Image: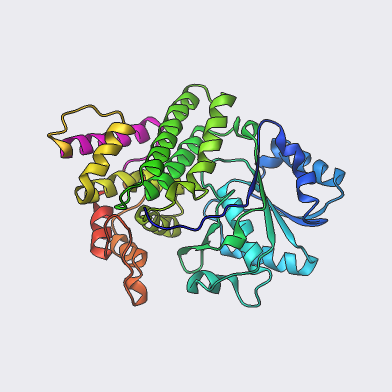
Amino acid sequence: MENFDYCNPTRIVFGPGVHSQVGELVKPHADRVLLHYGGGSIKRSGLYDAIAASLKAAGVAYVELGGVVPNPRLSLVREGIALCRRERIGFVLAVGGGSVIDSAKAIAMGAPHKGDVWKLFAEGTPVEQALKVGTVLTIPAAGSESSPNTVITNEEEGLKLGYGAQVLRPVFSILDPELCLTLPPEQLANGVSDMMSHIFERYFSNTPHVDLTDALCEATLRTIMKHARRLRASPQDADAWAQIVFSGYVAHKGLLGLGRQQDWACHGMEHELSALYDVAHGAGLAVLTPAWMEYVFRDNVPLFVQFAVNVMGVEGGFREPEAVAQEGIRRLRGFYKEMGLPSTLEGLGIGADKLELMAKKATKIAFGAQRPLGGLRKLGWQDVLAIYRVC
């Protein structure tokens, strides 16, 4: 196990109906906030009115900015930054899923910054000051409700970049499973794929002596798959949604990666799909993850056997470890198919014409200096291209 320094100060308020507490949770931090959200779903569902009433009852004024879309756009972030500066806003309240929360974090980091916020993403400049952020989660998936990370798409340049800083962790997040009861099946599927990938990026590690986090990763993966299947059969099963919401939070709060080298190759490869083709992040990960596993599993066969047995329920002779590992990967593909997720790039509407460009962008060689992806195995652009082609 490797040394680590971990602190996650995000307050989690969990349970049915807790979104009504948002006003009293915001009040100690600000009397005036930016209310940030996506499309019209929060208004159609009545959530917008409930949030507005709670803020009003607590004496919190708000200025609103809607319009966040999946793979949140830099243009709206810039608009939000200008709005916060003009209205002297010191707190951003995100009501939505990971895209809304990521957009809120980017606004929060850009508002106190004198230059353009995209430069922070492009150069990785350290950020030590940001507006405070609170969230009301409506789509369990990205785990952004307690992470220090944000990912933004520059639609003009066709780039999707991430940024992480401890000051971007939300001060509180409201996790109300009842807000998920009307989510369509594709949102469930994409969300489950995303949160499972957050675990895979930490679990598939060459770091030895990490028994506890191995077990925590495996238990969380089994829980996600079990309750995702329940929700496919009964979409309004509130108890199953509670398990999924809690699992998505655990998957990306940082706990499962403590003391271990992490990978993040699949996320790096998928960001190029989203940047150029605007595909759903979870759907892209469902295509790439099994292909990545097939490409790298021989670098750590015992770990992939452990995954196959402890997570995917494979039974077989341990004299044939590669066969056991491959059966685990096959079953993962089967689970994604069961959830209605695509299995090929063609299924995402992606052709072969830009695969090399995406591989070179993912590894930064397109920008003059290659930076290999991954931890379990370092992937150069030719490796990434090979994985894309398998897909």
* Relative side of 236 to 201, left or right: right
Which region shows up in magenta? Answer: 322-343
- 132 shown above or below 24: below
Residue 29 x/y as whole percent: 77, 55
Residue under the image location 19 percent in, 48 percent down: 298
| Residue 219, quarter of picture | top left
| Residue 236 visible in the picture | no
Is 249 in the magenta? Answer: no
Q: Does residue 208 appear in the picture of this structure?
A: yes
Direction from residue 118 to residue 366 in the image, left or right: left
Q: Main secondary structure of the magenta part?
A: helix
* 371 lies above or below 228: below
Does residue 188 lie above or below 280 as drawn?
above
Where is residue 116, by image quadrant?
A: bottom right
Q: In this view, does 250 lie above or below 237?
A: below
Q: Position of residue 118 (x, y in %)?
A: 55, 71
Compare residues 277 and 112 and report the one nearer the observer: 112
Q: Residue 132 at x, y = what percent?
A: 69, 59
Q: Which residue corresponds to the image point at 83% horizontal and 56% vertical from the top-left?
A: 31
